[in-house]
Amino acid sequence: EVQLVESGGGLVQPGGSLRLSCAASGFTVSSNYMSWVRQAPGKGLEWVSVIYSGGSTYYADSVKGRFTISRDNSKNTLYLQMNSLRAEDTAVYYCARDESGGGGFDPWGQGTLVTVSS
Amino acid sequence: QSALTQPASVSGSPGQSITISCTGTSSDVGSYNLVSWYQQHPGKAPKLMIYEVSKRPSGVSNRFSGSKSGNTASLTISGLQAEDEADYYCCSYAGSSTPWVFGGGTKLTVL
């Protein structure tokens, strides 16, 4: 079964750091385009970052320079390193696969909540 | 990159058809046939319903269909059912620097 399981969310103070993990099963992370998408409480979806199968990475302007997407092929796991966190980064963070490269994100993980507050 | 524009809410009665619009620009929706649609029930992860404008993943009901004209994409749900009540989001490719942009979401109410 193709599945994604996120972990690593929690409460962090403004200016702090957090690393999210997304463990994949049923497929190979490194052979797919993988994205992070977030959803602030009561708000819509916001695309955050993507890592392509070739290793290229891209970010939304709102997180550029603060967040880093990466993967560990030996663990078949995707990561999102989040630094200099702000209150507006508070959201549920989802990882998702884009198998065709055409933007059809499927599947999605269950999400992990990141709360940035003092 | 600005979010795509969707109506905040739409509604319909069981058995009816509804259409949700998703308006972008010539830099995203208008330039690429890479529009996808997602259904999200409260407290759940989004689910892919349509990709590449009009393709349906395996397991998605054929009551869901997608189309595009110019800078506007549309999701049509026919034969509305109670379980279709959810939030719906569109997403489009927007170029190589910041590849993906979502719409603000539309709340579908089945009356």
Image (cartoon, coloured by chain):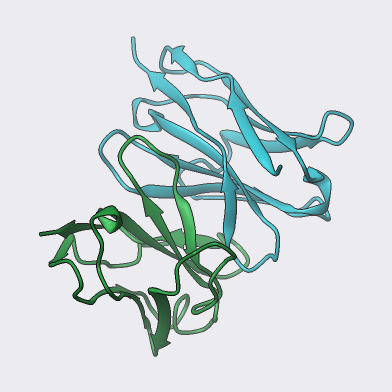
Chain colours: A cyan, B green
Q: Is residue A56 left or right of residue B53?
A: right
> A78 or B17, which lies in front?
B17
Please give the name of the residue rendered at 38% of the width and 55% of the height, measured from the top-left corner.
B39
Q: Quadrant of residue A79?
A: top right
Q: Is residue B18 left or right of residue A65?
A: left
What percent of the width, then of the height, locates residue B11? Answer: 14, 65
What percent of the width, then of the height, locates residue A71? Answer: 77, 36
The quarter in which the N terminus of chain B is drawn is bottom left
Task: Please indicate, yes or no, whether residue A81 appears anywhere in the rendered image.
Answer: no
Please identify the residue farthest to the top as the structure is shown.
A118
State whether residue A63 is above or below residue A6: below
Q: Is residue B43 left or right of residue A9?
A: left
> A70 or A16, which lies in front?
A70
The quarter in which the C terminus of chain B is drawn is bottom left
Please identify the residue farthest to the bottom as the structure is shown.
B69
Please identify the residue farthest to the left as the structure is shown.
B111
